[in-house]
Image: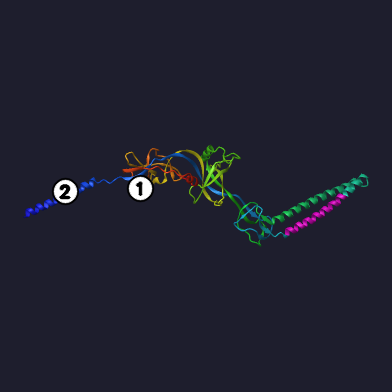
Amino acid sequence: MTSMKLSKVAIFVALASMNILGCGDKARLAVPPSAEVIVSHPLNREVTHYLEFTGTTAALEFVEIRARVEGWLESVRFVPDSKVKKGDLLFVIDPRPFQAQVDQSEAALKGKQADLQLKQANLKRAEQLLATASISRLQYEVHSAEEAVGQAQLGITKADLEKAKLDLAYTQVTAPISGHVSRNYVDVGNLVGAREKTLLTEIVNDSSVYVYFDVSERDLLMLMRMWPNIRTQQPSDRERPPAYLQLADETGYPHEGKIDFSEPRVDPSTGTLKVRAIFSNEKGLLFPGLFGRVRVPIQKKEALLVPELSVGIGQAGRYVMVVSKDHVVEQRLVKTGPLEGALRVIEDGLAKDEWVVTNAIQRARPGAKVTPKESPIPLTSPATEKAAPPSPR
């Protein structure tokens, strides 16, 4: 009886061992399928290379409006932060003292004119008497000198009258340029122009804006070779190098302008040249004093492009995942260039006939075997490229 029980136990153990061994064989034979990834050849097309700078915007015209005569501010004739045209009345300074000076000068002028007429009549009579030897030559010279003094005094009086009229005109403070006017810095009733030319307000013409930026010697030589007419005195619009502007909160470079000025020499203390570009400001988004990025095209050449999302960043630098002929993933370090829409320029480290993982990148691990599925890289639309030109690296 005991022998039979031991036999049953042995048989049970043997069957259990066989089941376990069989399961182990199945586990060893069950190989998980390789991950499926999307691969593409890099795009090979012509791209434009740019030089990029940091610039500062400045107004096309800027004027400080100051009081030219001393007097009491009588009225303010504009709305702060509004647009004004050249010649619009902005301030009125009490004109009464200046009008009185004009009236006084006009009366003095009439008196000098009458005095001169009398002296001219005396001189004419002296000429007749001298012809008949009725007076001496000395008496004639006296009348002639008096007439000359009268002419001079009349000229001084006329000049005094012109100055009085000019001072009277300065009581009407008008806009010398068109643009946006600031607030009035002095309120009505205050004395202005007493010891200094009091600042009344400011006008900024921002219909277009300038952007000033510094170009290094190396970049300057590159610009000169690409745009040899950049330093001509009066280049045509076609010859002027284009420039693109990006503000702090913008993507791409949506503002297009032209380089219109550069300093005549390189600053030896900094080794840079001051350059200026002009941009239209129809939408009024550009304010003087803003910082921005400026980009100038210098070269066109063939380049390889891959989707920006397929480029990773590691401790050794930027990389892409490449699938070999054996369907094995390799992490490839690359040297990247600027963005072209949603595509990144690859300057070095990648061949045009290699397969780059462009989708399901999280499944592609270095050394792992994958199932590649080919799919072409979509081209960026021309409208998108125009609206959002390449950004800096």
Which residue position holds label 1? 362
User: Which quadrant of the figure has residue 102?
Assistant: bottom right
At 86% from the left and 47% from the top, the residue drawn is 144
Q: Position of residue 140 (x, y in %)?
A: 88, 47
Q: Of helix, strand and loop, which one carries label 2?
A: helix
Q: Is residue 185 magenta?
A: no
Lower position in the chain sequence, tag 2 or tag 1: 2
Which residue position holds label 2? 18
Could you classify mark 2 by the number of other residues whose Cα lies within 10 Å: few (under 14), some (14-19), or many (20 or more)? few
Looking at numbered disc 2 in the image, what kind of residue is underneath it?
Answer: Met
Q: Is residue 115 magenta?
A: yes
User: Which quadrant of the figure has residue 263?
Assistant: top right
Q: Position of residue 273 (x, y in %)?
A: 55, 42
- Magenta-tinted stretch: 97-121
Looking at numbered disc 1 in the image, what kind of residue is underneath it?
Answer: Gln
At 9% from the left and 53% from the top, the residue drawn is 6
Q: Position of residue 206 (x, y in %)?
A: 58, 51
In this rendering, does residue 126 appear at all?
Answer: yes
Image check: 380 left or right of 76?
left
